[in-house]
Image: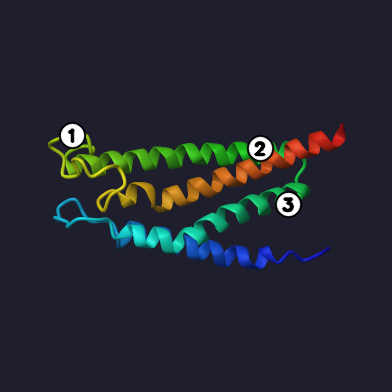
Amino acid sequence: MILKRYLFVYPVVLLFSFFGFYLLENYFTIPPDVISGNGNPGMFIVIAFLPFFIVGYVLSYLVAKNDLAPYLNISTRLILSMLLFISCLFLLNAIIKDAKELFFALGGTPENPESKIYRFGWFNQYTNSVFFNMYTFLLTHKLTIIFGLFTSYLKSQYDEK
């Protein structure tokens, strides 16, 4: 068996990607009770960690498609994909709950004139944690793994014909 180099790089890239999400959620999101100046300092973190985010998703896809799926039969892939999808629903529920709580604390969404973030747009220094948090990190990687398993299934079906 040929040892694939990306299997060594994958955990490191995931760690850096996770660290980027962690920084955005915990250090570059302004709490609702604090008055912030102009600009979103979290954009610097997004730009700095964007290569790790992208490579992390690509490697999650490749590991699922090339290194996990070949060792699973079709029914096991289906069961694993369904379990991952169900866990994604729980993560979505947690994301929506946290977002509602944040927007309540901010006084509404960016369209609400009474809101602290009125006219800021959806991605601002108060809402970084809505888009970059541990739930979204897990959700996006799980969806990428499901996609990798699905494409391996399609490839196996195509190869049989």
Q: Relative to residue 77, is residue 55 depicted above or below?
A: below
Disc 3 versus disc 1: nearer the observer: 1
Query: Farthest residue toward the right?
Result: 161
Label disc, if present, on residue 66 of the rendered structure: 3
Q: Nearer the viewer, residue 68 or 117?
A: 117
The three-letter amino acid code for the residue at tag 2 is Ile
Residue 38 visible in this rendered orientation of the protein: yes
**Which residue in the protein does label 1 denote?**
112
Of the two numbered discs 3 and 2 on the same chain, state the one appearing first in sequence: 3
Disc 3 versus disc 2: nearer the observer: 3
**Separation of disc 2 and disc 1 at Cα?**
43 Å
**Which residue in the protein does label 2 denote?**
79
The three-letter amino acid code for the residue at tag 1 is Asn
Residue 63 position within the rendered picture, expressed as x and y whole percent measured from the top left: 67, 54
Question: Which residue is located at x 70 percent, y 67 percent?
Answer: 5
- 132 displayed left or right of 11: left
Q: Label 3: state its secondary structure.
A: helix
Q: Nearer the viewer, residue 153 or 49?
A: 49
**Separation of disc 3 and disc 1 at Cα?**
47 Å
Q: Nearer the viewer, residue 113 or 15?
A: 113
